[in-house]
Amino acid sequence: MSQARNILAAVGKFPQDEPVLARAAEIARAHQARLTIVHVIDDFSGLELAPADLSLIQYQVQLGARKSVEAALARQDVDVPEIDIRIEIGSPYQRVIELTNEINADLVVMRAHQGDSILAKIIGSTTDRVIRTTCAPVLVVKRPVTRAYHGVVVGIEMSDDSAAVVPFVAALLPLAGLHLIHVVQILPPFEAAMLRAGSGQAGIAAHRVALIRKAKARMRDMSKRLTNRPIRSATRVVVGDPATSLVRATWSPQADLIVLDRRRTGRIRRALLGSVTQRVLRTAACDVLIFCPVPQQARE
């Protein structure tokens, strides 16, 4: 990504969603991008009203939502070249996905939503469902905005998607310092299989050393892509549980944002154990950017 052209901010309630507007406007202004703000209202199909009354109520709700967004923009003193406010009716996550595709959004900005019910754990909140199904990166705002992103932690893996994370973040946030972190872990089932196969603890240790060596080589390759940035970047390889290690990295006062690539896991496994991405998303001490490469045809 050389430059963001379309930023989508999904909002619902104010003042809770004012940080979403602030972050979306900050990035849109830096890239001179178009900012689309969407507020989705659940449909009124369940109400037993005459069509005329239903239309009037719908109009009043939409008008109130638009005024709420406009008031929030005025409070934030948003200075973006082009702003489009969309008040939509329907399923919140479906309309956000559809609008993301419609405007070819380079980035979707949303608020972190917590859900404690069994249904929320299995199906997920609007934010969770957008992250799982959208074709664009999603920035989840968890904290009030006090400054531009200065320190960004980037989780690195061996996947091809992970290789695309670094240039994306470097282009999106050209003035932020990047801290690349690669967590090495031998999964317990694989370790048990190695023991059953007769590898022993020495074999497991040798495999761990090989993984660390491979991770360091990958990190060196990643860091070469950042040599021309105005702010020095750092790399680190750690051994441990990925979610725990990445969350700990967000405890630093210098960490404003953590970036992860989207990982797909089964719904039941996600509900019972949680993917690394979900665990970091729910417990990180800073904002979270979930990377998903925008298909090339969507940018043309």
Image: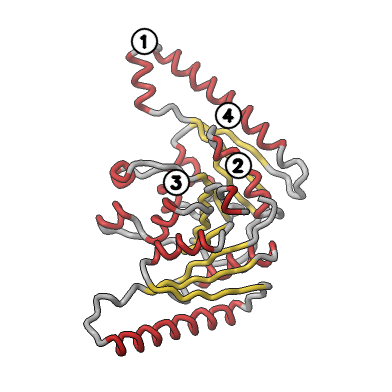
User: How far is mark 2 from mark 3, CA to CA?
Assistant: 17 Å
Residue with the mark numbered 4? 215
**Which three-letter amino acid code belongs to the residue tagged 3?**
Thr
Can you tell which quarter of the image residue 253 is in? bottom right
Q: Whole-percent x and y of residue 188?
A: 36, 27
Task: Please determine whether, in this image, residue 27 is positioned above or below residue 131.
Answer: below
**Of 282 and 88, the residue lying toward us:** 88
Which residue is identified by label 3?
277
Q: Label 1 sits on what residue type? A: Gly
- Residue at the (66%, 45%) spot, across then down: 167
Q: Which mark is residue 164?
A: 2
Nearer the N terminus, badge 4 or badge 1?
1
Residue type highlighted by circle 4:
Ala
Question: Where residue 252 sits in the image (x, y, percent)?
Answer: 56, 50
Q: Nearer the viewer, mark 1 or mark 2?
A: 2
* Image position, residue 223 (x, y; %): 69, 37
Nearer to me, 182 or 298: 298
